[in-house]
Amino acid sequence: VRAKKEGITQAQIKAMQDFLVHQQQIQQQAVNELVELMQEGGLEVSAENLWQDLGLEQIEVTDEHYDPETQAISILLLFSSEQCEDFCPAIEVINGQLHQVLSGT
């Protein structure tokens, strides 16, 4: 968590709470993009076995300076692949909604 000297902000806490409430929905929404991204990278994966290959490595919570234009707090879910340790995709969540899937090669 990117925290200031005063600690974690209420906006960061709310962003994490919003993510947790919508976690399953976000995961389902990201499946097709993640599968496509992995297949483009030469990895054999399908929607059925995606979560067997990907493991959550880290969760990052930004502050409002991550995107100065919107000042939105992002939750970044960083994954590792069992098939290729150099492939580490991420899911970005803003306001409890899937924002984008990021390549991590």
Image (cartoon, rainbow, N blue to C red):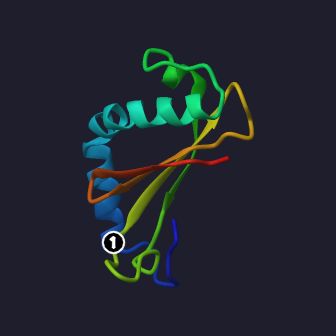
Callout 1 secondary element: loop
24 or 17, which is in the foreground?
Answer: 24
Q: Residue furthest top?
A: 48
| Location of residue 70 with respect to 80 vertically, above or below | below
Q: Residue furthest right?
A: 85
| Location of residue 61 with respect to 38 vertically, above or below | below
85 or 45, which is in the foreground?
Answer: 45
Query: In the shown orientation, is residue 41 left or right of residue 63?
Result: right
Q: Position of residue 104 (x, y in %)?
A: 62, 48
| Residue at the image position 59 percent from the left and 24 percent from the top | 53
| Residue at the image position 39 percent from the left and 31 percent from the top | 32
For label 1, count other residues whose C-alpha is less than 10 Å away and answer few (under 14), some (14-19) or many (20+). Answer: some
Q: Position of residue 2 (x, y in %)?
A: 52, 71
Residue that badge 1 annotates: 72
Q: Residue furthest front?
A: 40
| Residue at the image position 57 percent from the left and 47 percent from the top | 103
Q: Position of residue 91 (x, y in %)?
A: 45, 47
Look at label 1 and name its amino acid. Ala
**Residue 65 figure quarter:** bottom left
Q: How many marks?
A: 1
87 or 80, which is in the foreground?
Answer: 87
Q: Position of residue 46 (x, y in %)?
A: 49, 18
